[in-house]
Amino acid sequence: MTDELPDRIQELLAAESSQAPAKDIQSLTADQSSEELALLLESLPVDQRVDIWRKLETDRQLDTLVYMRADPRERILDDLSEEETNQLLTDLDAEELLELAESLPPRLVELALARMDSQQREWFHGAHQYAEDEVGHWVNRDLILLPQTARVRDALRVLRRNQPEYCDAIFLGNRAGQFSGVVKISRLWAQPDHLPLLELAEEHANGILATEDAVDASMKLQKSGLASLPVVNKQREVIGRIDMATACELVNEFYEGQIMSSVGLDEDEDLFAPVRKSAHGRAVWLGINLLTAFAASWFIGLFEATLQQVVALAVLMPIVASMGGIAGSQTLTLMIRGLALGQITDANFRALLKKEVNVGALNGLIWAVVIGLVTSLWFGDLMIAMVIALAIVINILAAAFSGVIIPIILDRLKIDPALSGSVILTTVTDIVGFVAFLGMGTWFLV
C-alpha cells in the first residue's frame, strides 16, 4: 500500500476535482482494506477527505473511521449532520465504540450505548474499568473458554461450530471461572477423544493481568509463540484475550508515538491540521530548544575575545558540536530501545556504561586524528589541529557518557527519554564541546 499511496492520492484527488459520482469513488477504493483506506483519507486535504468519505459505501464508512487517527477522524465527525451521526452510531459494537469514544461527545457515546444489546454494553463498561495504556482496555471477547474438565472431543465439537480469528489455542478455566491453562489447537488432532484437555496444556503459557501495560503485554504475546493469550482480572478470571492483530497495532502505535514525541509532536496529529493548531503545538518545543540554544550561546560568549583573535576557531566550532551530537544520539537511541525492551537493569548498567565509553574513546581517537590532519592541512597550524583533536576526543567521550546516563535518569524520574532525551543530550554535547574547544584554544593560542 505504501508504494501505491502516491498514485492512489492522485487518482482520488483527480476524481474529486472532476466531481466524480459516488460509484466512481467506490470503484477506486474497492480493492483496499479499511486500514489502507483510513491512511489514504488521512493523506488528503480536509475538504476532499470529508467529501470522499461520504461517497464510500455505508458499511465501509464506520470501519474506516475506526482505523483513522483521532485528529483526522474528528475532522470528519465534526462535519456530519445530526442525522448522519445518528445513522453512523446505529450498528456500533463495543470494540468500535472504544476506538471512537475519544472523538465523540459524551451525549453521543450514551446514545450509541443505548442502541447496543446488554452484552455489548457490559463489554464496553468492562473495558472502561481499565486505563487506555492497560491491556484490559483492549481485550478481544471472542474466544474459546472451556472447563478444565473438558476432553478432546468437547474441544473439537466447539471448533467445528466456530474458530475466531487469530485463535490457535483453547483456554481452560476451573469451576470459579479462573484461568487454569492453554491448549494449542494443533495438538488436538492426533489425540484420543477421551483425553482430558488439561493433560495437553502448555507448561509456560500464562494469563496476562488486565492491569499490565498494553505494550508490555503485546511483547509477551509476540514472544509466546501463540496467536493470542488470555487476559485475566485480579481474581484470575478470564475477561478476554489479546490477539496478534491487536498486539501489532498497539506496538506500532507505541513506536510511532516515540518517534513523534521525540520532536514534540502528537502521534494523532492530522497531516492537514489547521495552521494555528499545528503552530501552537510546535511552538512549545521550539521554545524549549531556544532556551538550550541560548545556554550554548552564553558559553560561547565567554570566549568572545578568543574568537576575535583566532577566527579559525569560529570556523571549526560546528565540527566539534556536530561530532559530539551524532555520537551521543547513537548511544541515546540504543539506550531508549534497551529501556523499552526491559534489557537494562542495575545489574548490567555498569558494564553497558563501560562499553559505551570505550566505544566513544576509540571513535574519538580515530576521528580526532582524521580531523586534526585535515585541520593542519587547511590552516597550516599544528596547534589549532591539536586543539580540535583534543576537543573531539573530550566531546565524544562526554556524548557517550551522557547518552547512557541521561535516559536512565529520565526513566527513573518517570519522564519519557524519547521525548526530552535528545534535547538534553544536544545541550550537553554543545556546551562541553564549545567549552573544551574554546577553553583549550584560549589556553594554547591566545
Image (cartoon, grey):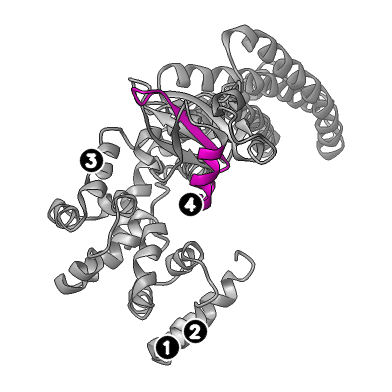
Separation of marks 2 and 1 at Cα, in angstroms: 6 Å
Please say whether residue 174 is one of the residues in the magenta stretch.
yes
Separation of marks 1 and 3 at Cα, in angstroms: 39 Å
Q: Which mark is residue 436?
A: none
Most foreground residue, 36 or 153: 153
SS category of the residue bearing label 4:
loop
Question: In the image, which is nearer the foreground, mark 4 or mark 2?
Answer: 4
Picture coordinates of residue 33, whole percent (x, y) = 51, 67
Question: In the image, which is nearer the foreground, mark 3 or mark 4?
Answer: 4
Q: Amino acid at mark 1?
A: Lys
Please identify the quadrant where the N terminus is shown.
bottom right
Which residue has dot 1 on it? 23
Q: Is residue 71 above or below residue 17?
A: above
Which residue has dot 3 on it? 125
Separation of marks 3 and 4 at Cα, in angstroms: 26 Å
Q: Amino acid at mark 3?
A: His
